Image (tube, rainbow, N blue to C red):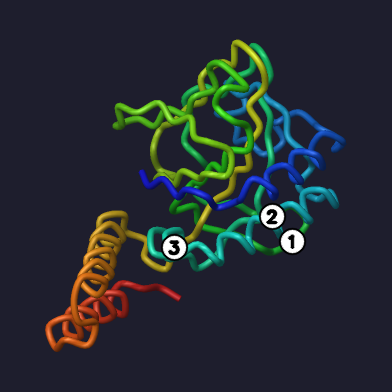
Amino acid sequence: MIVVPGVLDAGQVRDMRARLASASWIDGGVTSGHQSVRVKRNRQIDEASEDARILGSTILDALGRSALFIAAALPLKVYPPLFNRYGEGETFGDHVDNAIRIRRGSDFRVRSDLSATLFLSEPDEYDGGELIVEGSDRAIKLPAGDLILYPASSVHRVTPVTRGERIASFFWIQSMVRDTAARTLLLDLDRSIQELAAAGDPSSPALVRLTGVYHNLLRHWAEL
């Protein structure tokens, strides 16, 4: 799992929350598969609504400016962001995200290599509501504006909210590099290159060769 801090700044979060406060909310089961709908109790805004389109565009623009998101996800396609809220007693039990997400009323489709949750509520605004991803010992509850990336193939859940309200955006990414292990190696290599460049001579032959290794591996693994 990769935490991407500060995807949205405080002003963007505030404006987004204000628009969501007046949006129309529907049963969250509309985007669920036949298994997950049985364990899902939350609300969403209609993905075809003007609110979803405007707010989703803000998030997509912010993702395009996030070097860490791009390095970690190597995005080919991003499903237009959706928005959900969990009030007291609402939860989403163990489930795996659908392998292919098709935007309703269009031919736009995404293979869900990665799932993303962008938190829009501050942690002290609600109790419960942690994201739990199987295989991790962390209960994820991030500051508003921060994002968590995790494999869409993992079993995960949102624990019941017991106080307040948890508001977030969620979406899926089709990566240029399908294999999780390969993406992880590329991210580690990219981080090492950046650290070495910052600490020394960015034009050194060794660093140039290492940068070439990164791009040649990406060239070998990428699917476009």
The residue indicated by pointer 3 is 175
* Dot 3: element: strand
Percent position of residue 20, x then y: 79, 38
Residue at image point 63% right, 26% down = 166
Looking at the rendered image, the disc whose residue lies closer to the viewer, 3 or 1, is 3
Q: The residue under label 3 is which amino acid type?
A: Ser
Q: Is residue 210 left or right of residue 220?
A: left
**Residue at (70%, 58%) from the top-left corner?**
58
Q: In this view, does 55 lie above or below 75?
A: above
Which residue is painted at 64% across and 55% down in the image? Answer: 59
Location of residue 133 by image quarter: top left
Name which of mark 3 and mark 1 comes first in the sequence. 1
Residue to which mark 1 is pinned? 106
Amino acid marked by disc 1: Ser
* Residue 95 rendering spot, x and y as whole percentages: 48, 30
Query: Label 2 belongs to which residue?
Result: 103
Crowd tier of the residue under label 2, counting other residues whose Cα lies within 10 Å: few below 14, some 14–19, many 20 or above = some
Q: Do the residues labelled 2 and 3 touch (CB within 8 Å)?
A: no
Amino acid type at mark 2: Arg
